[in-house]
Image (cartoon, rainbow, N blue to C red):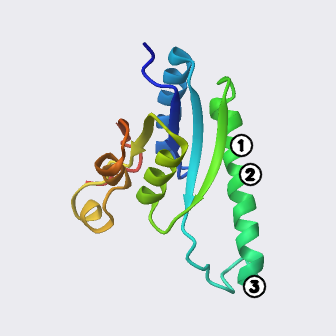
């Protein structure tokens, strides 16, 4: 019996998310599973005239940002999961990262989510909350969370 067939790995492109990719790589190789590397992007309009963006309009910024995210997903896939037979990437548009992850997992029939936590605690955790915690609470499949101490605050 295989533990999993379809693994979802959310990434925010942080060092912590590399930990989850490593665990997913091991699980995929042991179970001949496929991996989907997903990034959730908030559709809230970007600030026009922000440094480095010049005089671009909102309509010009969004495709540029999406192109950059897709390029980064491709780069990370090749560098971190290049030896896995079946890997796809996805960009999910959602105002809430946890909701985007859970809805995508349901839609794609994911049977396991592997993700890192940033190890926030105290006031930071209270104010920001935890994407991983919300995914664990609402996902319809098992969620393997890996606590990263990279950038953790106490």
Judging from the image, what secondary structure is the residue with disc 3 in?
loop
Q: Residue furthest top?
A: 1
Q: CA distance from mark 3 to mark 2?
A: 21 Å
Q: Please indicate whether residue 85 sits to the left or right of residue 105 in the image.
A: right
First in sequence: mark 3 vs mark 2: 3
Circle 1 sits in a helix, a strand or a loop, which is it? helix
**Relative to 18, residue 134 above or below:** below
Q: Residues within 10 Å of mark 1 (few under 14, many from 20)?
A: few
Q: With respect to residue 68, does 152 lie above or below? A: above
Tag 3–tag 2 contact (CB < 8 Å): no
Seen as rendered, the residue at the extreme left is 122
Quick one: quadrant of the N terminus?
top left
Pointer 3 local density, CA inside 10 Å: few below 14, some 14–19, many at least 20: few
Residue 81 falls left or right of residue 126: right
Q: Residue at x 49, y 22 (%)?
A: 27
Residue corresponding to mark 1? 75
> Are the two marked residues, 2 and 1, in contact with CB atoms closer than 8 angstroms?
yes
Residue to which mark 3 is pinned: 57
Give the CA separation, mark 2 to mark 1: 6 Å
The residue tagged with tag 2: helix, strand or loop? helix
Q: Position of residue 117 (x, y in %)?
A: 37, 46
| Marks 3, 1: nearer the viewer | 3
Q: Which mark is residue 21?
A: none
Q: Which residue is mark 2?
A: 71
């Amino acid at each position: 019996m295989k533990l999993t067939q379809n693994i979802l790995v959310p990434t925010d492109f942080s060092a912590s998310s590399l930990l989850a990719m490593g665990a997913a790589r091991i699980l995929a190789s042991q179970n001949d599973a496929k991996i989907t590397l997903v990034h959730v992007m908030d559709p809230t309009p970007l600030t026009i005239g922000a440094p480095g963006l010049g005089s671009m309009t909102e309509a010009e910024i969004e495709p540029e940002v999406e192109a950059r995210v897709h390029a980064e997903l491709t780069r990370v896939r090749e560098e971190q999961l290049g030896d896995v037979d079946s890997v796809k990437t996805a960009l999910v548009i959602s105002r809430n990262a946890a909701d985007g992850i859970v809805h995508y997992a349901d839609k794609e029939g994911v049977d396991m989510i592997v993700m890192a936590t940033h190890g926030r605690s105290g006031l930071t955790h209270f104010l920001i909350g935890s994407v991983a915690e919300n995914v664990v609470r609402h996902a319809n499949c098992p969620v393997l969370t890996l606590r990263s101490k990279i950038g953790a605050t106490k």
